[in-house]
Image (tube, grey):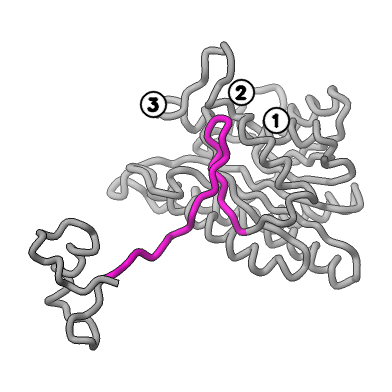
Amino acid sequence: MLDGRVVIVTGGRGIGRAHCLELAAQGATVVVNDLGVGVRGEAADDADRSPAEAVAAEIEAAGGVAVSDTSSVADWEAVRALVARTVERFGRLDAIVNNAGILRDATITSLTEQDWDAVMAVHLKGTFALTKHACDYWRAQYKAGRPVAGRIVNTTSGAGLVGNFGQAAYAAAKAGIANLTRTTAMEGARYGVTANCISPVAATRMTAGTGLAQPGTGDGFDPFDPANSSPVVAWLCSEQSGWLTGQVLRIDGNTVHPVEPWTVRPGYTAAGGGRLSATEIDAGLRVVMGVAPAGLASLRVR
């Protein structure tokens, strides 16, 4: 499916590692990016080599083509250089998978400015930085008259879609990524680029100890295997997926669900036909939210 295509993947552990292996198995040349830090973004020296190097070596041992990169996705110039090096070495760039992330969980009253900034830098800025520099390349290719089939795959989460207690920074960043995906899809369509977002349900370092997704027993299909979303990512990176853009796909076990964006429900219309009055909002919203006494059913709803 991906023969001849070159893909950059950020985040070389867990889900990111699974993506890299699947992409390589489908024929892609993979650039594995991982800074090699811990879950909170702290320095980690628990391995003989970086996760990026380990995954690249695993791919090469299986007969694939991969290189490692240890740049920080939060470093604007480093990401620009990553894209430039990829194009220089392989002659092209066809897809990017924004997967890198950290956690600094705390309730709003306990969350520090430093923790907020760190989470935003990796998730939201990091996703935008690689998107920006890849799109610059694809737009230049398009203007030069060359065919472009650029693919962007971003990563959101359940917290980004519906929120989660104690994850204000993470949820806000992931929600931002979902909407960034939609905007990128609108703009990228002009020069042959699609942008989609996945929301994987998986057991990873980030879910350890949360009581949420936990690893399976090893017997039969594991609905929380980090690799479950990787076939979807491989397809999204292919030329075949060019008809789909601006979408969020929730991958839960062996099922892929399209996610609807924010929708506008039927609402309450001002009784007098003019602008809304502050005094009628309480009763009006009780009706449209379905919590009003039956006697208020005559209020205008549309």
Q: Nearer the viewer, mark 1 or mark 3?
A: 3
On the picture, is 147 further left or further right than 74?
A: right
Rendered image quadrant of residue 71: top right
- Residue sitting at 38 percent across and 48 percent down? 163
Task: From the image, tell me which residue sits under label 2.
Answer: 46
| Front one among 9 and 36 | 9
Task: From the image, tell me which residue sits under label 1.
Answer: 50
- The answer to whether residue 200 is above or below residue 124 is above
Task: From the image, tell me which residue sits under label 3.
Answer: 211
Quadrant for the C terminus in the image: bottom left
| Front one among 12 and 146 | 146
Near mark 1 (Cα within 10 A), the count class, few <14, some 14-19 or many ≥20, is many
Q: Residue 45: where, in percent of width, then height?
A: 62, 27
Question: Is 48 colored magenta in this rendering?
Answer: no
Alpha carbon separation for disc pair 1 and 2: 9 Å
| Front one among 34 and 263 | 263
Q: Residue 236: where, in percent of width, then height?
A: 70, 47
- Residue sitting at 84 percent across and 68 percent down? 142
Q: Under tag 2, what secondary structure?
A: loop
**Residue stretch in magenta:** 246-267
Q: Amino acid at mark 1?
A: Ser
Q: Residue 240: where, in percent of width, then height?
A: 78, 49
Alpha carbon separation for disc pair 1 and 3: 28 Å
Near mark 2 (Cα within 10 A), the count class, few <14, some 14-19 or many ≥20, is few
